[in-house]
Image (spheres, helix red, strand yellow):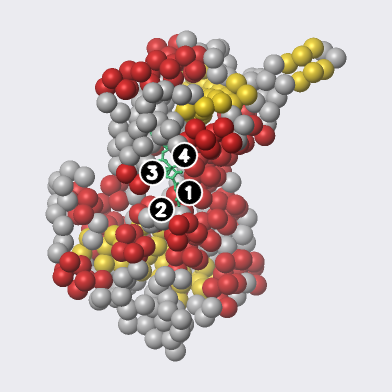
Amino acid sequence: MSTPLSAQEVKGIISAGSKGTSAIPVVVAVPKELAPGEERVATVPEVVQKLTKSGYEVRIEHNAGIRAYYPDDLFTAAGAKIAFSRTDLLNDARIVLRVQPPTVTDVDQLNEGTIVIGFMNPAHNLDAIARMRDRKVTAFALEFVPRITRAQSMDALSSQATAGGYVAAILGADNCPKFLPMLTTAAGTIRPATVLILGAGVAGLMAIATAKRLGAMVEAYDVRRAAGEQVRSLGAKFLELEINAEGQGGYARELTPEEKAQEQQMVSAAVARADIVITTAAIPGHKAPLLITKETVMTMRPGAVIVDLAAESGGNCELTQAGKTVKEYGVTIIGAQNLPARVPFHSSQMYAKNLQSFLALLVDKDGALVREFTDEILVASILVHAGTVLHGPTRDLLSGGKP
Ligand code: NAD
């Protein structure tokens, strides 16, 4: 259990907000992402144009968008200034937009009171969060934006999961020794490949749609029964089990041991007949559920492919190695990591639009930073502010407790 802050404490902290005035444009800085394999950028020229029109001054670090195919000259044409050093970029910047969480070194370059917005992956980034607390930097974590209707345009988890699901299906097809569609040719008839999707959330549904477009026969399974309708509407077959594990906020809950055994049996039979399995099953804040054991992999067809999107949170397959592609018992197992970075042009574009919507909550109608972070979306996503870690589970982790 996290130690709650009193309502008075929270009010005192969030009202310590900003000192902006409309006379001075809010400076928004976008650094080049330095994490290995990261190809995305937190804003794109189309969004910069809108931000500059709304009165922001936008600064882009030299070559920040180059790997996503947004060169500096497109940003300049959209009204941004290019900064050739971190000092020039961050000097008097009030807001920093990022994709990956800042490192301790990144935080050390920020001035007190700077607002950083991006994915924060708090449980794996405690040192940088402690540093943001100590340097009185404010951080908003996009993974905590609530999934309410008003926040849909800011839902970066969904936009990036869409990109991840698409890439997963393409990777599966690329590694599969078979055609995906049915072909009737003079050289004979080819049966369509079978693609199985485990976990039909945002990424899973996109993987289903992509595999269907490639002509495969698609089956899917999710513990949330509500997912069945969405799966069927995409023309795929939904595998039914007498379990409905819909938990809080539309997310899945953990299964009981009996339910897990039932699930294993049904999933194993479906996995054995699939040519490509794409796994996306996740429970927020928990290790990914194990859906494909080593024994099940041994029953798969030679040449079959598993693309494990849960690789970073422990994997849905027992033999997955995060960040690696391995071959076990004739099956190619892809421990997928950061798949959205493989389509950086569009994943950056979607992410940039999510951030544009989020920014609108931080600035009032006169173009000045809001004085209080009282909007429910800001309250839910604020991680650190004015020297305090406001997210209870992260505060507990920092003080050595359990999440
Ligand atoms: P997620 O990434 O947390 O999990 C992926 C999927 O894995 C989920 O569909 C989950 O039910 C499933 N899963 C978990 N354990 C499983 C198991 N043992 N076996 C099979 N499947 C398992 O989920 P997500 O993609 O972020 O979406 C979660 C929910 O939020 C969905 O209901 C989605 O429709 C909803 N959502 C709502 C909004 C909104 O209203 N703005 C936006 C996005 C998503």
Crowding at dot 4, Cα within 10 Å, few <14 / some 14-19 / many 20+, comes out as many
Of 32 and 376, which appears nearest the observer? 376
CB under 8 Å between discs 1 and 4: no
Q: Of callouts 2 and 4, which one flags the residue occurring earlier in the amino acid sequence?
A: 2
In screen coordinates, is 294 left or right of 271? left
Ligand 1 lies under 8 Å from the Cβ of mark 1: yes
Circle 3 residues within 10 Å: few <14, some 14–19, many ≥20: few
Which label is found at residue 208? none
Which amino acid type is shown beneath numbered disc 1?
Answer: Ser
Q: Are marks 2 and 4 in contact (CB under 8 Å)?
A: no
Query: Which tag is nearer the camera, tag 2 or tag 1?
Result: 2
Q: In which quadrant will I find the C terminus?
A: top left
Neighbour tally class for label 1: few under 14, some 14-19, many 20 plus, Cα within 10 Å: many
Q: Secondary structure at mark 1?
A: helix
Mark 2 and mark 1 in contact? Answer it, CB < 8 Å.
yes
User: For disc 2, does the CB lie below 8 Å from ligand 1?
Assistant: yes
Label ID, residue 201: 4
